[in-house]
Amino acid sequence: MMTSAAVYGGWVFPQISTRLCTRCAIFARPNGVSFRHRKRFFLTTNCVSDMAVTIASDHSYGNKEVISVTPHIYDYLLTNVREPPILRELREETASMRGSQMQVSPDQAQLLAMLVQILGAKRCIEVGVYTGYSSLAVALVLPESGVLVACERDKNSLEVAKRYYDRAGVSHKVDARHGLAADTLNSMIENGEGCSYDFAFVDAEKRMYQDYFELLLQLVRVGGLIVIDNVLWHGRVADPLVIDKKTESIRSFNKALVDDERVSISMVPIGDGMTICRKR
Ligand SMILES: C[S@@+](CC[C@H](N)C(=O)[O-])C[C@H]1O[C@@H](n2cnc3c(N)ncnc32)[C@H](O)[C@@H]1O
């Protein structure tokens, strides 16, 4: 079911409270609260371009309207995203580069940045940086003392990202790690950084999702948030005829998560929602 992606802050931060129009909510709870199951919070997302373009409303959906995002609706959505100029410049530069379709969309980046703010995150991890759009969106909202460990195996795209961190004046918050992300995450664990991160975003090799997840569970604190992109994988996971390795891998990852008691989960197709972060 296509829903409005929406986020509530389950508690009030001094400078941030949130209010959203919603049919779907992601709840997170602050660290320090007594958790019965000591869960980390886990959010899965899927970019809007993955949505099937159909509109349905019948009994099989409990008579709820199912809205799918068309290019027309998506254009409207983008005109209502607040995108910092530096991010727009990066998006425009990336548009002519190989692999530009991999970049997260402005609405996704906006949600990531908001989640980081709601969480009051100071220590973040990104797996799969490309030219840096999502990582820059996160770095921009981190406090001055914050850090984002940005893992990327492709040197050339990481150079673009670093150039933009510089231009945006956030280089001091970003620890860019060139190499295989699993190696970087393992070395962080060996370094004694377990349970010291608040937030992680995974947007890299799909067949590694389960591995990234297990590593990040060790690095992200209880009450922290792990966001995984592309869990609907352009809709392929829902088509039993599609059995390529990436699709199968994401499918089994999604299935495993449903029964994983270590985390609270929310699968969110990002689309027609609008998230509002009230600053004052
Ligand atoms: C979908 S793109 C990331 C897009 C990025 N989040 C953005 O907003 O622009 C995936 C990136 O992950 C990188 N990647 C893939 N496998 C990797 C691995 N094993 N270790 C590190 N980076 C990897 C790719 O080089 C690519 O740049």
Image: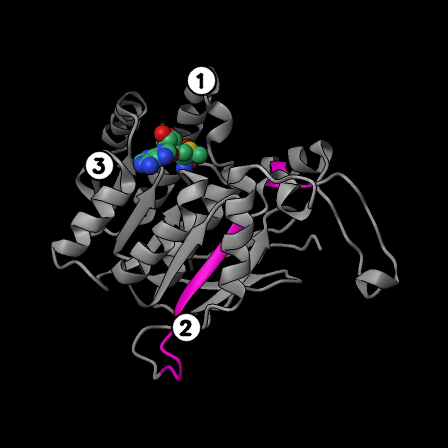
Q: Is residue 175 left or right of residue 10?
A: left
What kind of element bears circle 2?
loop
Q: Amino acid at mark 3?
A: Ala
Q: Amino acid at mark 1?
A: Arg
Give percent across and percent down for residue 46: 56, 46
Sequence-wise, which precedes: disc 2 or disc 1? Answer: 2
Q: Nearer the viewer, residue 107 or 196?
A: 196
Stretch of the chain drawn in magenta? 35-51
Per the model, the C-alpha gap separating discs 2 and 1 is: 39 Å
Per the model, the C-alpha gap separating discs 1 and 3 is: 21 Å
Q: Amino acid at mark 2?
A: Arg
Name the residue: 44% across, 17% down: 98
**Disc 2 and disc 1 in contact, CB within 8 angstroms:** no
Q: Is mark 1 within 8 Å of ligand 1?
A: no
Q: Which residue is mark 1?
A: 98
Sequence-wise, which precedes: disc 3 or disc 2? Answer: 2
**Disc number placed over residue 29 in the picture, else none:** 2
**Disc number placed over residue 74 in the picture, else none:** none
**Disc 1 and disc 3 in contact, CB within 8 angstroms:** no
Q: Which residue is mark 3?
A: 176
Q: Nearer the viewer, residue 57 or 106?
A: 57
Near mark 3 (Cα within 10 A), the count class, few <14, some 14-19 or many ≥20, is: many
Give the quarter of the figure containing the N terminus: bottom right
Residue most extreme to the left: 191
Q: Is residue 190 left or right of residue 157?
A: left
Above or below: residue 2 compared with residue 218: above
Image quadrant where residue 258 sits? bottom right
